[in-house]
């Protein structure tokens, strides 16, 4: 197998699920496994999660839902994004649970479900301030009534999505609380119209961490379950560990003299005689090229600076003048464990979010599933 691999620690996923479940007082968990489970591999991750107390799964596309069904996963799967009209038969055949935000879409779904001779569970989606998909709160009771009148749809739940729940900024905290207020009053209005809104859910990872009022009946944390705290300062409150570990090996080691440069563009020159190791991982694997000269990698349990431009398929590390490193030594680019940079550390250094790092680990990097 290729030296560069993404180890997926299913034991850590399970303990993250247990930690979040306990933190939210045993509420139901809907686990987003969209984008191939944030790059971790949807089928193995979803299967492990369902065995560890997750109740619902969520995907972004019909194709992602079909992949889970092909793997014989039976749990309810919420479709978070909107499908194309031509995808509706596949959506129904795969028994996905769409989010519905407008009456025209509800009628199309109803017709497709009726044509397939089935009743489709759906969740109403209310836009309380995300500005992406959702029915406006003031239109929600009328919309809910229209959906409730459709013979082949069944309202199983009602949801909203929080726009800034992972921020401790005062304005953002207040904004999120107003979103929760708006969701609560919308639910009350739907109930007053004589309609059961079903399972209520709003909280992404930020909501789980900072807004207990957003927990309702079910929470939808992705990031936290993959092991990244959505905000700093949760140590001792909500303990999660990164599930993905990007590992590789030294494939070449050579002495380099002071004044010699390493890699494209000569952005790094040795200021002393040293030993340089080559690692077969590059930006085509998803290691951002923008991190060139700014990355710390772990070789044989110790931290060393990555030096020179990160190439498409390889990068180099300065092992120091007295290095005893050997070809084949294990390298860790990011992962769990003390002293190991996490994908969140790489993201911070790169001016992005951990989601983009784990989702960006390319398909050519084999995922290897570990139980311990
Ligand atoms: C992706 C997504 C989530 C999960 O968000 P995290 O920030 O990863 O916790 C929850 N709800 C919806 C609608 C989403 O699209």
Image (tube, helix red, strand yellow):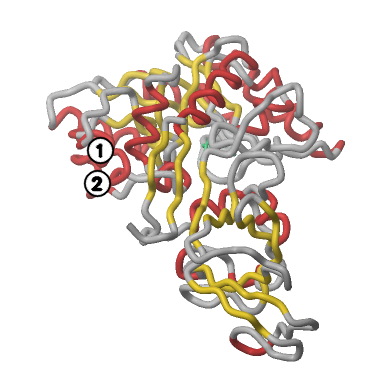
275 w.r.t. 186: above or below: below
Q: Secondary structure at mark 1?
A: helix
Q: Is mark 1 within 8 Å of ligand 1?
A: no
Q: Is mark 2 within 8 Å of ligand 1?
A: no
Q: Position of residue 241 (x, y in %)?
A: 61, 34
363 w.r.t. 229: above or below: below
- Dots 2 and 1: beta carbons under 8 Å? yes
Residue at the (49%, 58%) spot, across then down: 248
Q: Mark 1 Cα within 10 Å, few/some/many (few <14, many 20+)?
A: many
Q: Position of residue 163 (x, y in %)?
A: 66, 40
Q: Position of residue 207 (x, y in %)?
A: 66, 29
210 w.r.t. 105: above or below: above
Q: For residue 294, which quarter of the picture?
A: bottom right
Where residue 91 is drawn, which disc sits there? 1
Q: For residue 131, which quarter of the picture?
A: top right
Q: CA distance from mark 2 to mark 1?
A: 6 Å
Q: Secondary structure at mark 2?
A: helix
Whether residue 56 appears in this view of the structure is yes
Q: Mark 2 Cα within 10 Å, few/some/many (few <14, many 20+)?
A: few
For this orientation, the residue located farthest to the right is 170
Residue at the (74%, 27%) spot, across then down: 210
Residue at the (38%, 45%) spot, across then down: 368
Where residue 87 is drawn, which disc sits there? 2
Residue toward you, 112 or 225: 225
Whether residue 350 appears in this view of the structure is no
Residue toward you, 10 or 89: 10
Quarter holding ligand 1: top right
In the displayed structure, does residue 7 sit left or right of residue 255?
Answer: left
Q: Quadrant of the N terminus?
A: bottom left
287 w.r.t. 310: above or below: above
């Amino acid at each position: 197998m290729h030296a560069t691999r993404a180890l997926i620690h299913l034991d850590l996923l399970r303990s993250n699920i247990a930690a979040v479940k306990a933190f939210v007082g045993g509420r139901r968990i809907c686990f987003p496994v969209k984008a191939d489970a944030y790059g971790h591999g949807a089928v193995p991750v979803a299967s492990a999660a369902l065995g560890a107390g997750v109740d619902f799964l969520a995907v972004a596309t019909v194709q992602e839902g079909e992949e889970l069904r092909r793997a014989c996963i039976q749990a309810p799967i919420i479709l978070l994004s909107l499908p194309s009209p031509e995808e509706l038969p596949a959506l129904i055949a795969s028994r996905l649970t769409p989010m519905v935000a407008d009456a025209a879409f509800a009628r199309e779904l109803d017709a497709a479900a009726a044509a397939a001779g089935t009743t489709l569970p759906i969740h109403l989606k209310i836009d309380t301030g995300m500005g992406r998909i959702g029915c406006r709160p003031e239109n929600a009771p009328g919309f809910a009534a229209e959906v409730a009148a459709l013979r082949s749809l069944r309202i199983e739940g009602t949801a909203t999505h929080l726009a800034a729940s992972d921020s401790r900024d005062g304005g953002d905290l207040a904004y999120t609380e107003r979103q929760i207020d708006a969701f609560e009053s919308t639910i009350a209005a739907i109930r007053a119209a004589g309609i059961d809104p079903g399972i209520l859910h709003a909280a992404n990872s930020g909501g789980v961490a900072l807004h207990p009022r957003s927990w309702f009946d079910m929470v939808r944390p992705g990031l936290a379950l993959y092991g990244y705290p959505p905000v700093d300062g949760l140590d001792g409150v909500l303990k999660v560990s990164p599930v993905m570990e990007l590992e590789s090996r030294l494939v070449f080691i050579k002495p380099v003299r002071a004044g010699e440069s390493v890699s494209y563009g000569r952005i790094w020159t040795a200021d002393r005689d040293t030993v340089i190791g080559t690692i077969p991982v590059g930006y085509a694997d998803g290691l951002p090229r923008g991190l060139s000269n700014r990355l710390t990698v772990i070789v044989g349990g110790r931290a060393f600076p990555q030096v020179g431009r990160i190439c498409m398929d390889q990068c180099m590390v300065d092992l120091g003048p007295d290095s005893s490193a050997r070809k084949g030594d294990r390298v860790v680019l990011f992962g769990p464990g003390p002293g190991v940079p996490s994908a969140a550390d790489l993201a911070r250094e790169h001016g992005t979010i951990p989601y983009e790092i784990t989702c960006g680990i390319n398909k050519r990097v084999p995922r290897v599933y570990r139980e311990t």
